[in-house]
Amino acid sequence: MLKLTAKNRDIKQDLSEMRKAGELPAVFYGLNKKTTSISVSKIEFKKVWQQAGESSAVKISTPEGDVDVLIHDVQVDPVTDDPIHADFLVIDMNKKITVNIPLEFEGISEAVKSGSGTLVKVLHEVEVEALPKDLPHNIVVDISKLATLDDQILISDLKAPAGVTILAEADEVVASIAEQKEEVEEVAAPVDLSAIEVEKKGKKEEEAAPAE
């Protein structure tokens, strides 16, 4: 299991100074535990976040003991995309939980390769139930099955790891192929110069005509 070491954090601490020092302010809560303010190394957190996402269990070592959590929510800087705050949800490793697992599309679709169609990703994640230790980082979707415009990948086609139950309906569409349509370039209609000349001539005659 991935691990992080945390320090207790005084909520009165200057968060800007903390971040400058390389620490990420965070909290953990849930499972009858009070909301606890902590800080973790930003560098270490980014490494764990990249591997765990929001679906793999992480063990946080605190001065009071270890806590098993999921990365529940991460606030990021809108300019740098760096994390600026993290929420951890405390979990029981012996009880099944329900989470959304991202889908990772792999392989080569013959329909896409031939140019006859484009890949349509209907779902980007699926809801699953499992013990925290069995939760995968993602579920792979093999798009090589999509050879023609009529082919689809359904929930029933996905292969979940042992101990993981996908909760979506078996006949729900995960991915399909849409027909590739050629863009038709619009040709501008030829300009009728004679009509323009007549219009200009008529306008001049109107302007030259004496007022009644």
Image: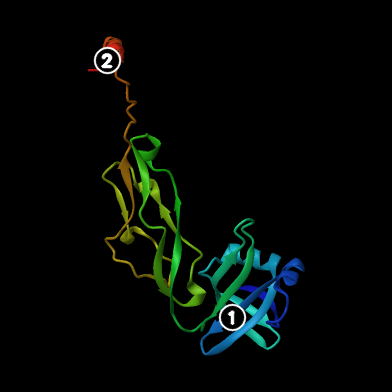
Looking at the image, is mark 2 or mark 1 earlier in the sequence? 1
Direction left: furthest residue: 212
Image quadrant in which you'd find residue 193: top left
Q: Nearer the viewer, residue 190 or 166?
A: 190
Say which of 24 and 13 sits in front: 13
Label 1: which residue?
28
The residue that mark 2 highlights is 206
Image coordinates for residue 123, horizontal then vertical, percent:
37, 57
In-front residue for pair 198/80: 198
What amino acid is labelled 2 in the image?
Glu
Q: Residue at x 59, y 58 (%)?
A: 78
In this view, which residue lies farthest toward the right?
A: 21
Q: In percent of the image, x 39 and y 46: which residue is there?
A: 144
| SS class, disc 1 | strand
Image point (37%, 60%), residue name: 158
107 left or right of 48? left
Tell me where residue 101 appears, x and y as whole percent.
45, 65
Residue furthest out toward the front: 212
Q: Position of residue 46 (x, y in %)?
A: 64, 64
Q: Nearer the viewer, mark 2 or mark 1?
A: 2
| In this view, 163 is above or below 46 | below
Q: Secondary structure at mark 2?
A: helix
Placement of 49 over or under 121, stated as above or below: below
